[in-house]
Image: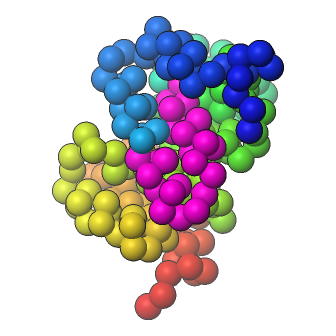
């Protein structure tokens, strides 16, 4: 995947500089941590490290947008907004981020864009890069919640079992907060349970 500025696509350093302007310091550092974790996981699972690096650094590129900015970008980009997303627009920063990665950062790699798009909810039949970015977001070094160490350990043993643990934790958290659970998350968990995990 070409990333040189001479081709109209930002270099990694240019991406970082733009993110520093667009995100607060905490979110920017989270993006760096996710990038590093994603590259490490990609190396472990023989996935393209460059794709993991770009998807990792850009996964939250839409987090600096206001609620109004998220919805207006959805209209411009033709992103479907369901009733759950209307009530919980933070879930839209994945699809909106994929759009921004394409138009603002020059990313044309569909695998990278898909990993950014689905990192908020997951999806049925996730690809390896999807799984890596989703998990890297959950287990990056600054994450601190009950069960995270077990997910980190499992991430380097069985990525699908790690995803099951992550989905279970997310679903429990959403239920505890009495928030709406997106069906994409349920479908992602069910797919892994049916086709990938062993008893």
The quarter of the picture where the C terminus appears is bottom left
**Magenta residues (range):** 37-61
Residue 57 located within the stretch drawn in magenta: yes
Outermost residue on the bottom side: it is 199
From this view, report whether residue 51 is shown above or below residue 196: above
- Which residue is located at x 66 percent, y 65 percent? 125
Q: Main secondary structure of the magenta part?
A: helix
Quadrant containing the N terminus is top right
Q: Is residue 47 above or below residue 69?
A: below
Q: How is the rendered protein coloured?
A: rainbow
In x, y percent, where is residue 73? 67, 18
Residue at 60%, 57% (x, y): give it.
47
**84 displayed left or right of 139:** right
How far across and how far down the image is residue 165, in percent? 36, 67
The outermost residue toward the top is 21
Q: Residue at x 35, y 69 (%)?
A: 154
How many numbered dots are placed on residues in this image?
A: 0
Q: Is residue 145 left or right of residue 101?
A: left
Q: Is residue 189 magenta?
A: no
Camera-side residue: 91 or 88? 91
Give residue 83's position: percent from left, percent from top: 60, 38
């Amino acid at each position: 995947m070409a990333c040189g500025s001479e081709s109209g696509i930002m270099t990694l350093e240019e991406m970082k500089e733009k993110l520093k302007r667009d995100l607060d310091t905490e979110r920017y550092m989270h993006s760096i941590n996710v990038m590093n974790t994603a590259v490490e996981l990609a190396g472990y699972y023989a996935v393209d490290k460059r794709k993991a690096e770009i998807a990792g650094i850009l996964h939250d590129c839409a987090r600096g947008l206001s609620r109004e900015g998220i919805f207006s970008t959805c209209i411009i980009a033709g992103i479907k907004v369901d009733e759950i997303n209307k009530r919980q627009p933070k879930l839209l920063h994945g699809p909106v981020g994929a759009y921004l990665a394409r138009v603002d950062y020059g990313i044309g790699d569909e695998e990278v864009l898909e990993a950014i798009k689905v990192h908020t909810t997951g999806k049925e039949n996730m690809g390896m890069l999807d799984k890596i970015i989703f998990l890297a977001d959950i287990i990056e070094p600054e994450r601190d919640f009950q069960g995270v160490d077990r997910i980190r350990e499992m991430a380097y043993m069985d990525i699908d079992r790690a995803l099951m643990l992550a989905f279970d934790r997310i679903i429990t958290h959403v239920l505890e907060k009495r928030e709406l659970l997106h069906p994409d998350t349920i479908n992602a968990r069910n797919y892994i349970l049916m086709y990938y995990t062993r008893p």
